[in-house]
Image: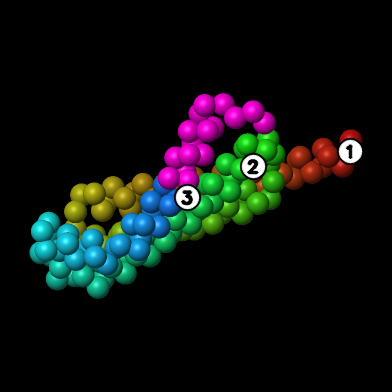
């Protein structure tokens, strides 16, 4: 498939998010200490729980972006309705719900309006990904039946 500008930009952006996310995840202990020192003393007092919550959430975010990168390859190849995309959507749904639960816990430790927005956003994203995986599952089934009849 000849890549159009939007597909190229999306692929570049997903790659950038993935590799910069790894950098953020690796430097998290240091940047969280700085945030505790210069931004909010409460983060410093809750350093270990925040490190665990943000660390696991970061890994979940990387899994989501990695899954999207894999799905983007199927878009470029013009073969979107494959069982790998169904699995990717299910994984993205599960890790989105994990992020929602982690930030619900964070909201108990350090309540902020942004934490509640993140909980709602990732809960909806998790549900959306799960429903979309079911739609893709049916599309894959129809495609495979159609391929057999030809």
Observer able to see residue 49:
yes
Q: Are marks 2 and 3 in contact (CB under 8 Å)?
A: no
* Of the image marks 1 and 3, the number of the one nearer the N terminus: 3
Magenta-drawn stretch, dominant element (helix, strand or loop) = helix
Quadrant of image for the C terminus: top right
Numbered mark located on residue 65 in the image = 3
Disc 1 secondary structure class = helix
What residue did someone put label 1 on? 149
Disc 1 to disc 3, C-alpha distance? 36 Å
> Pointer 3: residues within 10 angstroms few (<14), some, or many (20+)?
many
The residue at the point 64 percent across, 42 percent down is 74
Residue at 48 percent of width and 39 percent of height = 12
Residue with the most extreme bottom position: 48
Was residue 2 drawn as part of the magenta stretch in this picture? yes
| In the image, residue 88 lies in the stretch drawn in magenta | no
Q: Which residues are magenta?
A: 1-16
State if disc 1 and disc 2 touch (CB < 8 Å). no
Direction right: furthest residue: 150
Q: Is residue 97 visible?
A: no
The residue drawn where x is 61% and y is 54% is 87
Along the viewing direction, whichever of 43 and 106 lies nearer the viewer = 43
Q: Which colour style is shown?
A: rainbow
Taking the image as shown, residue 134 lies to the left or right of residue 100, namely right
- Pointers 1 and 3 in contact (CB under 8 A)? no
Please give the label number shown on residue 74: 2
**Residue 114 vertical position relative to residue 26 in the rendered view, above or below:** above
Estimate the x, y position of residue 42 in percent, counting from the top left: 13, 65
Q: Alpha-carbon distance for marks 2 and 1?
A: 23 Å
Q: Nearer the viewer, mark 2 or mark 1?
A: 2
């Amino acid at each position: 498939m000849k890549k159009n500008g939007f597909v190229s930009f999306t692929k570049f952006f997903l790659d950038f998010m993935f590799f910069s996310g790894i950098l953020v995840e690796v430097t998290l202990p240091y940047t969280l200490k700085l945030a505790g020192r210069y931004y909010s003393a409460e983060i410093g007092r809750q350093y270990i729980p925040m490190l665990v919550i943000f660390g696991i959430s970061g890994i979940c975010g990387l899994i989501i972006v990695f899954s999207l990168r894999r799905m983007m390859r199927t878009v470029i190849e013009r073969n979107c309705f494959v069982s790998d995309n169904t699995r990717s959507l299910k994984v993205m749904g599960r890790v989105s719900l994990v992020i929602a639960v982690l930030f619900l816990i964070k909201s108990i430790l350090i309540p902020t309006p942004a934490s509640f927005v993140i909980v709602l956003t990732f809960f909806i994203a998790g549900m959306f990904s799960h429903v979309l995986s079911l739609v893709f599952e049916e599309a894959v089934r129809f495609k495979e039946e159609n391929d057999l009849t030809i």
